[in-house]
């Protein structure tokens, strides 16, 4: 049986590894000390059983398990609504101001992100539920090269 000191050493070593190397290490520990059982290894060391099993499978077959990090996370709104960026660009063309000192390449808008969102619903036929929130519209505007400024009040 493994002592607590050996278990601590295994856990420390596994914590310092990532990806395929970690899976192979945990699988090798399972083979050497737990009769190749991912379940027993999980119970004794607290490692993820699925990851151990993937490591065992890759050791047996000789092929690495492929991580698919690109599929994680939420997709950009432009992927979900492909015409959104073009529609926003068409709406704000008349409201763009250049930097007065020409120090930045950005176009500054005199409208708010909420105003752009409202125009998308009124003029482009979008439904309120399908459009992203005001903040996301602002992020899309930034990606398109626009910067939002608070509308200036006319001086008296």
Image: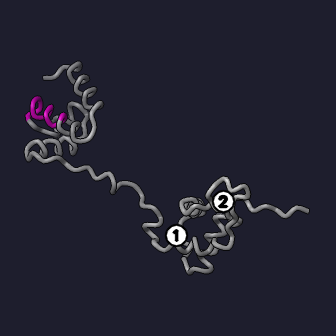
Q: Which mark is residue 55?
A: none
Q: Quick check: marks 2 and 1 in contact, CB under 8 Å?
A: no
Instruction: Pick out the residue farthest to the front.
Output: 102
Horizontally, residue 57 falls left or right of residue 136, namely left
The numbered mark, 2 or 1, whose residue comes first in the sequence reads 1
User: In which quadrant of the rendered image does the C terminus lie?
Assistant: bottom right
Q: Is residue 33 above or below residue 115?
A: above
Q: Residue at x 62, y 74 (%)?
A: 91
Helix, strand or loop at label 2? It is strand
At which x and y percent is residue 132? 53, 66
Quadrant of the frame with the N terminus: top left
What residue is shown with label 1?
85
Left or right, 96 with reference to 74: right
Q: How many marks?
A: 2
| Quarter residue 59 falls in | top left
Residue 113 on image: x %, y %: 63, 64
Residue 60: image quadrant is: top left
Q: Residue at x 52, y 73 (%)?
A: 86
> Looking at the picture, how far across and down is residue 49, in whole percent?
21, 42
Occupied quadrant, residue 154 = bottom right
Seen from the viewer's position, the closer of residues 103 and 148 is 103
Gap in Å between the C-alphas at discs 2 and 1?
16 Å
Q: Is 23 left or right of 122, judged from the image as shown?
A: left
Front residue of 86/101: it is 101
Callout 2: 10 Å neighbours few (<14), some, many (20+)?
some
Label 1 CA crowd tier, 10 Å (few <14, some 14–19, many 20+) = some
Q: Within the magenta stretch, is there residue 38?
A: no
Percent x, y of residue 93? 63, 72
Task: Examine the residues drawn in magenta and state their main secondary structure.
Answer: helix
Q: Nearer the viewer, residue 131 or 37?
A: 131
Query: Which residues, given as a range, are shown in magenta?
Result: 25-35
Task: Tell me the residue that label 2 is attached to.
Answer: 148
């Amino acid at each position: 049986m493994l002592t607590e000191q050996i278990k601590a050493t295994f856990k420390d070593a596994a914590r310092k590894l990532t990806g395929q190397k970690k899976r192979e290490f945990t699988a090798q520990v399972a083979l050497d000390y737990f009769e190749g059982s991912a379940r027993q290894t999980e119970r004794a060391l607290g490692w993820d059983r699925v990851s151990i099993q993937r490591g065992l499978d890759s050791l047996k077959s000789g092929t690495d398990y492929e991580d698919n990090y690109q599929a994680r996370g939420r997709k950009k709104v432009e992927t979900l609504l492909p015409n959104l960026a073009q529609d926003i660009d068409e709406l704000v063309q008349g409201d763009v101001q250049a930097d007065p000192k020409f120090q930045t390449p950005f176009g500054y808008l005199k409208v708010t992100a909420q105003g752009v969102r409202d125009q998308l619903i009124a003029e482009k036929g979008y439904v309120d539920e399908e459009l992203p929130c005001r903040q996301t519209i602002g992020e899309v505007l930034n990606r398109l090269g626009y910067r939002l400024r608070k509308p200036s009040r006319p001086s008296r």
